[in-house]
Amino acid sequence: MLIQPKKTLHDIDISGKRVLVRVDFNVPIDIERNVADDTRVRGALPTIKYLLDHGARPILMSHLGRPKGQVVESLRMAPVGKRLAELLDYPVVCVKESVGPRVKEAIDTNPDKIILLENLRFYPGESENLPDFSRQLADLADIYVNDAFGTSHRAHASTVGVTRYLPSVMGLLMEKELETLGSLLEDPARPFVVVLGGNKISDKLGVIDSFLEIADFILTGGGMCFTIIKSMGLDIGHSVIEEDQVSQIASTMKKARKKGVKVMVPIDFVVADRFDKDANRKVVPTEAIPEGWMGLDIGPATVDKYCVILNEAKTIFWNGPMGVFEWPSFANGTKSIAECIAAATATTVVGGGDSDAALRQYGLEEDMDFVSTGGGAAMRLLEGKKLPAVEALADR
């Protein structure tokens, strides 16, 4: 295992107990104050149902957006509570505070309802992991459960601080995330193909280095691949690049060759004469990107080449879009690769974030074996780094 085995819900008696649960309900809210995407809410349902089925009283807490320690009316948790009640067909009480006497009163007077605390990040003590705020949260319950994998790389009051005052275990979603992602680095079925996209190579260097120890192929796309291409001595026009990472990625590519891992870059691109959804565009070979033009999507020949490799894979991990998929003119690469992964016979794991958004956009989310709820946390785990919120839980 990548981490010390931690206790889970199955290891403790929760009957009749008040259970403080850190969930990740950081979801988009539309202009009509409704949850626009309930994926993360649905992800927490197994743990919440388990608590209810075993006679526990769930007290849920989450952050929403970035209010930076201030009350922001548009970031209150009430719309999330409404959607949760609909999904569970069970009453949910949304408290307009996270700690204090009114919160305790709401818990005492609603024994047969789920309690959802107000946005944790309305309080400076949350992000600063202040002991007083952590203690006030802990005073609400008998047991603490962390089911918010997406925030597990943050050492906040609700993820680390409360564990100092309550018996602390992981929830069912957290357990599934750690098992699935951990298995990628332990013993994946081969060929193991990693697909990496997104804008910045600096965000991916750690995970690339980790995958060099276990992957067979690393297929690159998105803006990040231009730094690799530049390190190979090719012109990239006005494509995005991190100049300060060129020498580092050159060293990484040298290491990949020694390890026998095939790190592949696109062989063609859809290029544009400016960064605009309506820009003039054309398909060109990688070695012929015109001066003044920029690559905004992988080209059709690259899609064909990558899909051959994906079709033969036994395990696939994908994180990051292949281009500016938000614009239809530059979405084909991401859509086509997503479709190839969805159609593959391999075990398919997606690293969340923009990849998850792309899957939802194309209606392919259900075709993947596992879609992580935590982009940053997933990448940190796959780099082999410790997650503070997981380390803080009780050892098994």
Image (cartoon, rainbow, N blue to C red):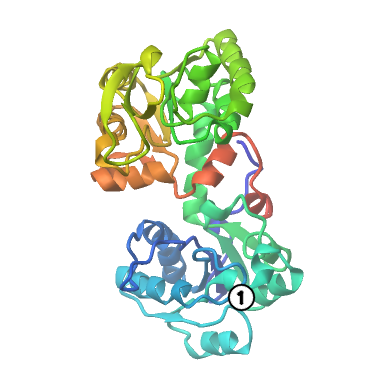
Q: Helix, strand or loop at disc 1?
A: loop
Q: Is residue 116 above or below residue 285?
A: below
Tell me where residue 193 sits by quadrant.
top left
User: Image point 47% across, 39% down: which residue?
Assistant: 180
Q: What percent of the width, then of the height, locates residue 344?
A: 28, 27
User: Image point 56% across, 81% down: which residue?
Assistant: 97
Q: Is residue 329 left or right of residue 197?
A: left
Circle 1 packing at 10 Å, graded few (<14), some (14-19), many (20+), is some
> Does residue 249 appear in the picture of this structure?
yes
The quadrant of the image that shows the N terminus is top right
Q: What percent of the width, then of the height, locates residue 90?
A: 34, 76
Along the line of sight, which residue is nearer the eye, 385 or 252?
Answer: 252
Q: What percent of the width, then of the height, locates residue 15?
A: 52, 72
Residue where numbered disc 1 is placed? 141
Q: Is residue 32 above or below residue 102?
A: above
Along the line of sight, which residue is nearer the eye, 329 or 71?
Answer: 329
Residue located farthest toward the front when viewing the structure as drawn: 292
Tell me where residue 212 sits by quadrant.
top right
Q: Is residue 68 above or below residue 348?
A: below
Q: What percent of the width, then of the height, locates residue 273?
A: 34, 30
Q: Amino acid at mark 1?
A: Ala
User: Image point 58% across, 69% down: which residue?
Assistant: 121
> Does residue 331 appear in the picture of this structure?
no
Along the line of sight, which residue is nearer the eye, 21 or 322?
Answer: 322
Residue located farthest toward the right when viewing the structure as drawn: 131
Number of labels in the image equals: 1
